[in-house]
Amino acid sequence: MPEPIYRPWGTVTPEFWDTPAPGTAPAPSGLAPETLRARLGEIAETARTGHLPDAAALAARLDLDVTAEYGEPHLHTVQVREVRGYLAALAGDHPSGLSWYLHAAQLRVTIQGPGHPDVEAATRRAYSLWRAVPTEADRQRLGAGLLTIAGDIHGLDSPLVRHIRERLYVLALPSPAATASSQPNDA
């Protein structure tokens, strides 16, 4: 049964696009939602044209700007960091991509709480990226971190954590070909 695919940038919440009502709070100086949308669009277009290092550099700069403007525990910051994870994965750097996704999931828990659907989706995106790691050895190594963070977020007995644990167990088992090659020849 194929596993569901979780989109890389998650669900954009209505709060992302909201601007404060006039007179209630000052609008951010340089990073109003329109500016964020435009810069994210520029990053997406740069990545779409195959210039992943340039897109990653733009995302890193946006991350610095968003963090300076809103602070680390803010959904705008989380969303930009998820973009950075996605770009790293597109470039073939699965360990960095997974690290960004897990970091974003932890920030989401801080902001939205462990039961929020966006937190669940963020953890599943990290899981999906982990499953795409090309080599089994890397998947085993990175799986321990995924399991720890997913357990912290969702609890050790959650269905997701049990599923990750089962996948890691299967990876740890010797493959039938490896078992057969380690047997002495009877000939």
Image (tube, rainbow, N blue to C red):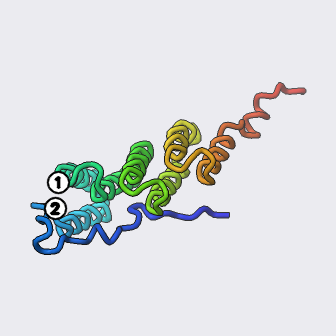
x 20%, y 51%: residue = 61
As drawn, is 115 to the left or to the right of 52?
A: right
Secondary element under disc 1, as helix, strand or loop, is helix
Task: Indicate whether 174 appears above or below 41.
Answer: above
Residue 106 appears at what percent x and percent y? 41, 48
Task: Indicate whether 38 appears above or below 50.
Answer: below
Looking at the picture, which amino acid does disc 1 mark? Glu
Q: Which residue is farthest right?
A: 187
Looking at the picture, which amino acid does disc 2 mark? Leu
Q: Which residue is farthest bottom?
A: 22
Q: Could you tell me how far apart the alpha carbons at marks 2 and 1 are, in whole angstroms?
A: 7 Å
Residue 9 appears at what percent x and percent y? 38, 62
Residue 103 appears at what percent x and percent y? 39, 46
As drawn, is 171 to the left or to the right of 9?
A: right
Secondary element under disc 2, as helix, strand or loop, is loop
Is residue 180 visible in the rendered image? The answer is yes
Camera-side residue: 176 or 27? Answer: 27
x 76%, y 40%: residue = 176
**Residue identified by numbered label 2:** 31
Camera-side residue: 83 or 53? Answer: 83
Q: Are marks 2 and 1 in contact (CB under 8 Å)?
A: yes
Question: Where does the N terminus fall, quadrant-wise?
Answer: bottom right
**Residue identified by numbered label 1:** 69
Camera-side residue: 182 or 102? Answer: 102
Q: Residues within 10 Å of mark 1 (few under 14, many from 20)?
A: some
Mark found first going from the N terminus, 2 or 1 = 2
Q: Residues within 10 Å of mark 2 (few under 14, many from 20)?
A: some
